[in-house]
Image (spheres, rainbow, N blue to C red):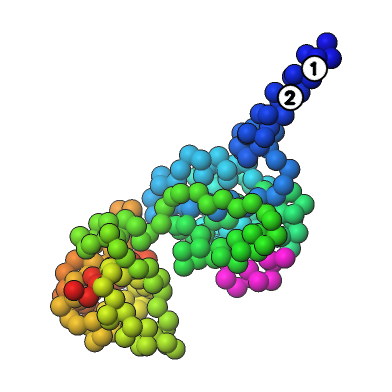
Amino acid sequence: MSLLLFKLCKVLNTYQKEDNNNLSSPFRGTGGMVYIVPSPIGNLKDITLRALDILKEVDLILAEDTRTTSHLLRHYQISKPISPYHQHNEHKVLQHLIHQLTAGKKMALVTDAGTPGISDPAFLLVRECIKSGIKTECLPGATAFVPALVNSGIPCNRFVFEGFLPVKKGRQSLLKLLAIEERTMIFYESPLRLVKTLENFIEIFGEERQCCISRELSKLFEENRRGTLRDVCEYFKQKAVKGEIVIIVAGKS
């Protein structure tokens, strides 16, 4: 009887070691963990089944905007505590979160749209978790620049992601450096600054440089405008622009 019990315990212990990070496992590890969870960039169906499972199982969801995340959770009938985590409070709450994670809490970090850390908060928390020996895992999923790049018709075998340009200080210096960049360049921009940014590109890169402007990706009124910087700039001067913007610009040939 004791030999049988010993073998059973050995099997269970082996299963626990192999499966203690599976959210559906009854042998989940006791250590804290942060899951970086991509959220839809427009269409709410663009979220993975695994992401939904994790959001249902974690102890706490960290959200860039609790209202936006609450809408997503309600859509999928998920009820979990939500705490704000954004660029204005991330330094303030960081050590408190690390303390909770060290105590064994499982957390999911989500932003308003796309993958956290890509022009959104995540870096500080991930870095501190690594320093503190807390496990982190980033799920694959939605991010705006990948479909914009692939759908642009501009070479995507080599590219550089610049995100949002500086609004004032350092903007011109950076653009002058990028003028000789041979890889395809990717930028994020506000609709309010789109035309001004395109005018800056024309001044520094030249008006004949090929580009593609993508907005409202995955939504009903998705638009991808392709052409030279001059033509695309003139187009957007004639219309009101809404939605998040991804700008793809060909590298120097």
**Residue 91 colored in magenta in the image:** yes
Task: Kindly indicate the quadrant of the structure image that contains residue 131.
Answer: bottom right
Q: Is residue 174 visible?
A: yes
Q: Which residue is mark 2?
A: 10
Q: Residues within 10 Å of mark 1 (few under 14, many from 20)?
A: few
Looking at the image, tell me whether mark 2 or mark 1 is earlier in sequence order. Answer: 1
Q: Are marks 2 and 1 in contact (CB under 8 Å)?
A: no
| Residue drawn at (40%, 47%) of the image | 46
Above-or-below relation of 79 to 97: above
Q: Nearer the viewer, residue 129 or 39?
A: 129
The three-letter amino acid code for the residue at tag 1 is: Leu
Residue located 28% across and 84% down the image? 200
187 in the magenta segment: no
- Tell me residue 238's x, y (percent): 20, 76
- Residue 138 location, x and y as percent? 53, 52
Image location (x, y in percent) of residue 17: 67, 35
Which sits in the foreground, 221 or 207?
Answer: 207
Confirm whether residue 195 shows in the render. no
Secondary structure under tag 2 reads helix
Quadrant of the image occupied by residue 166: bottom left
Q: Which residue is mark 1?
A: 5
Residue name at image x 27 percent, y 60 percent:
156
Q: Amino acid at mark 2?
A: Lys
Q: Which residues are magenta?
A: 84-95
Circle on res. 235: none
